[in-house]
Every structure is written in structure tokens, then in C-alpha cells.
Amino acid sequence: MKSKPDKTLETSKKGKTPKSIASTQSLSSFVKAICDVMRRSNCASALQYVPELTWILFLRILDAQEHKAREEAEALGNDYSAALTAPYRWQDWAAPFVADTLSEGKPIGWKRKELFEAGDGKLFEFINNELLPHLHSLDVDLITQLPNVNASRKQRVIGRIMTAVEKVRVDSETNLRDILDKVHEIHIDHIDDTHFFTLSQVYEDLLLKMGEKNSDGGQFFTPREVIRGMVHVLDPQAGETVYDPCCGTGGFLAVAFEHISRNLGNAPAATILDALKHDTFFGREKENLVFPIALANLILHGIDQPNLWHGNTLTNRPTYGGLFEQAPPTFDVILTNPPFGGKEGSDAQKNYSFETGSTQVLFLQHILAELKAPLDGKAGGRCGIVLDEGLLFRNNESAFVETKRKLVDECDLWCIVSLPGGVFSTAGAGVKTNLLFFTKGKKTERIWYYDLSQVKIGKKSPMTLAHFGFDKQGGVLADADLPRTLTGDWFEQEDNQGKPFPSFARLRTKHGTPDADSDFSWTIGFAARRAKAQADMLPFLDAVKNLSEELLPLKEKLKTLKKDKADKGKVAIVEEAIKAKEKAIREAQTKAADIDASVYDLKAVNPHIKAISDTRTVLEIIDTINLQGQIVATAMNNLRGLL
């Protein structure tokens, strides 16, 4: 039985080329139309249609990139070895048939035409039974499940991106051909080798859909404006390595690539660009659904060979490590947002000095080990990390205290930014978060805090780069361009007349000096705090020492009494004295430990917040209540009159 005529095939014979999509906005609308088709085709939620669109988009862009690379090689008289060959290329099975456009001797879309003419279901059969198994086998033998030693780097990436695709989710061939036609219109001309592919911005919007509230995808998505603010602070440079140990959809790595590319200008050296695309960005991700999406996202941004490791970072057990083989032992820059509230088992905990079930604490220990140590006068690696507030102030578990102690002993924790509530509401309602910035190689002497918690954040008013005071290039934003939700009534206050607003971007370069302190920022002398704690602990430590010395003769006396079978009353008196000494020792040790632990309460508490107290008397409050009651009564009478 033959299908109805394929209108796409008929019009394609006329030789129409894909229409131009002139802007990111029009491209976004174009991709939205593709998603609309998917939503009516058994892919109702973003967690279903984003992975489906991911592999289709990827194969389209891969085909365009390979076509362009072949043309460039032929122009130079060089051979070119493609990652995919017929009939598995997009131009064979997915592109609309164009009779008068040949590629390697066959018309564009020849396989699709052949499958269409063979009848209903043949396109699905080809994709599910031939195409997908072939793509899966590019880097792993389907029988032995061993790596394909002959696979090229690009073939490994293709195989990994396709791992999560077992079969087509779209429910009808008519809808699938409609999707393929629309995706085909996203043309190679949208690729800008100097910077990044325009589609990457649109793809970020799709990933945002995965991260919206009530979607399980929120745990894999960090708001991109927060990421951009963090990247501007750390300012990664060409020649440095950038790492994210729990990269999710790859946002930190993609934004870091944009940042470095933009700073390189319009004509970077070929060697620098090659290193940037192949040897700069490294990440790890555990989730099977998200790992291929991260790969595709980085490729769409222009990172040709993402160095991503698939598996549990904390247990160090790889699902697939073939793309991570060239990773260095330590990294120059780490940017990350470890999962909030996660719990790890003993197989992960035993890999770390301070065992705990807290995922964030274990990730922080992992990061401290992965940061590059200072060498030959060069500073050590630097990190920007998102941590929930509980980790900062929690001191009732040894692993929390000791991990923070290790952090401030091995690194200069120079900045903590207190973010508004709701920034990460998609990852868990009510999670209060902070940004920590630190550099390995020097003890923390002082910590500069900046408070953004007063900013009101919501779905319609999300956190933006302007709230940090940055412009798009990382410069200081002019006061006139700062959002009102940040500045509030600061400019109207008498003491602030004629002063520039103390934004984070404006003050951060002054950290460590009095000029960095403002209504929203302050500095903690951490070395002084530690010294004070040591002094406060000393009486209790001395008490422990003295009590321990007093305890020894009592124990010797008890031993002698028992040996001599002395009167039970005498033995009981000595035993009670020993118990009292031991109790006093424990109490002194606990008080000393509490003082020590309090040093590592790093929570941001703005000392400049002015407490507003109600100075009214009880009678004045009663009068106010009566007045409000009269207003309500008047309003009800007016309403009754209208009725």
C-alpha cells in the first residue's frame, strides 16, 4: 500500500533552497513551530520533545558541517574522510528530495524518496532498524559492547549523542516528515566559525523549557544570566582549561566558550581556535538523558570536540569515558552548580577524606582536588560555584566543618555573593543560594561579601546580568541602565546624592580594600576571626589538659583499690570522681569544638541592614485597627448600596 503523495517531495523537485531565517528571533519562532509539531506527535512535554529534537537537529548540523568541511578540503586538494556515509547522512534519508542537486553522484533526499515510495512505515523501519543501530555502533560494538578502536573522535561523539535514542518518539511519518522539512530549512549559512552558531541561542531556550518549574529538568539547568555573571568574574582566557564536574546541559562550558571567543576578536589564530574547540572544555555528567544533550549543546555552540565524561563523578565510575581521555589532571578554571540536597551512598563517600551523604560537600572536596596548584609564580586554579545556604552555615556535622576548613586553608575564598530567593526555584522551591569565588594556593585572610538578597525575583522578573551590574561584555553597567529592582530607593536617600551605585561589578575589583564596602557589601577579617576563636578556645583547651592530668592519678588509684579489694564505698567515691572529671572534659571539649566550628559559619548576614522597629504604643495600634475597620465597613456599605 502506497502513502498519499508527499507534497514535500513534489515541491522539492522544483529545486527550492531553504528559505533564509534572518535573525535569532525568527529562528526561535521557527524552532517553536517545530516543537508545536512534536507536541502533537507524542512528545507532549519539554522533557520529551527536547531530547527528540536534539538528535534531529544534531544530525542536520553535522551534515551541514561535513558538507562544508568536504568543500574546503577539496578546494585545497586534500582528502576528506566523513564521519557518516550514505545512506546514513542527513542529505540521504532526511532531506527533501531534489532531483537536480547531486551529492557524490546521488540526488539530495534519494533515500527518503525511496522509502516513501516503498509505503507506510518504511521511514520508521529504516530509522529504528538501520540508522540508529548504525549510529550507536560508531563507537561501541553492538555485540561485544567494547569500544570501536577504529572510531574517529567525531564518530565517538556521534555515537554518544545517539545513546539515549532507542527509537523515534514521533507518532506518525507525516508528522516526522513535516519536522524533517522544517529542520532542513535551518541552513549552513547560520554558522559563524569565528564565534558560535546562532542556533545555540535558540537551543538554550529549549533547555530553559526543560528547566521550568514543575519540570524534572530544572535540576540540570542553571539560569544563563547567573552563569554569565560568574564567567565574567572568573574571566577564563584562551590557553586555560575550563571544567565542570556536574555539567548538566553544558551551560557553564558553553558560556565560557562564548566569553573566550568574544575576547579573541574577529580573527584569532588558527592554532588558538583549534585549541579552544578541542582542548579547552571538560565536563562530567551522570544522567543518561542529559549527557547527549550536553554534547549536542556544546557542538551547537561551536565546540567541535567536547571532552565530556559520562558517569558518576563522585564514585568515579564511568559509563563512558572515551571522550575524556585527553583531560589534564587538574584545571585552571572550574565553574559549576552541584545538585542541591543530593544524598550519596558509601561507594561515593569512601573516595573523600570527609565522608558525608551531602552531594554538595563531596563535590566541593572533588573541586579542591581538581583545581590546579600554583606553580612557578603563577596563581593556582580559580573556581566559581553555586552552593545552597545550608552548606555555608551548617556546622553540626564534622564533614561540613572540615571541608570548609580545607577550603579556607588551601584557597583564598575572596568573595561570597548572597543571591535572591527564587533564583533556583526550578531546582527546588525555597532554595536560598550563594555564589562562592576562590583561588587555590593561599589561605583565606579576608572574605568580601555582596548582598543581592533584597532583589525581588519571579518568573516574570528573573535574575539578569544587570543585577550584577555587568553589561553583556562584562563591563560595568551605567547607573541609568541598572534595574529598579536592584537600586530601589538608594538614589533618593540623602546620603547617596551624586554617588555612583555600588553594584557588584563596580566594587568587585576593589575587594580587600575599604572602598569595596557599601550598603550592600562588607568584609570579614577571616584571619582575625580564626585568631579570636583560638583565644576563646584556649581556656577550654587548658581545662581539658588540666582535667586530663587530674584524671590519671584517679584512674591509678581506682586500679589499686580494685587490686587490693578495697571497701566498695571507697571504690564508688573514686569512680564518681572519675565520671565527674570525664564529664567535665567532654563539656570543655564540646565548648572548644563549638567555638572552632563557628569560625566556619560563612553565611552572609548584611551588617548594614537597618532594622525597622514599630515604635507605636498599644493604644496607637488599637486606633489603627479601628480605623482600618471603619474603612472596610464604609466600603461594604458602598457595595451594598450598589447592589
Image: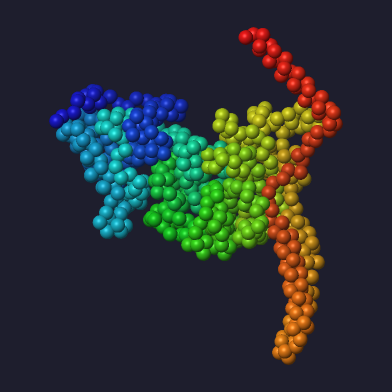
Q: Position of residue 595 (x, y in %)?
A: 74, 60
Residue found 76% across the figure and 73% down from its top: 581
Whether 637 is drawn above or below 354: the answer is: above
In this rendering, position of residue 22 left or right of residue 369: left
Residue drawn at the location 79% of the way across and 70% of the way down? 543
Q: Which residue of the protein is positioned furthest toward the bottom in this rendering?
A: 564
Q: Which quarter of the figure is the N terminus placed in?
A: top left
* Quarter of the C terminus within the rendering: top right
Residue in the picture at 62% in, 43% down: 432
| Residue 613 shows in the view | yes
> Is any atom of residue 229 visible in this view?
no
The scheme the figure's colours follow is rainbow
Residue 383 place in picture, x, y as percent: 58, 51
Residue at the spot 47% in from the left edge and 46% down from the top edge? 248
Q: Quadrant of residue 635?
A: top right
| Above or below 551: residue 642 | above
Farthest top residue in view: 642
Query: Total number of numbered labels?
Result: 0
Relative placement, left or right, of 427 versus 323 is: right
- From this viewpoint, which residue is outermost toward the left? 1
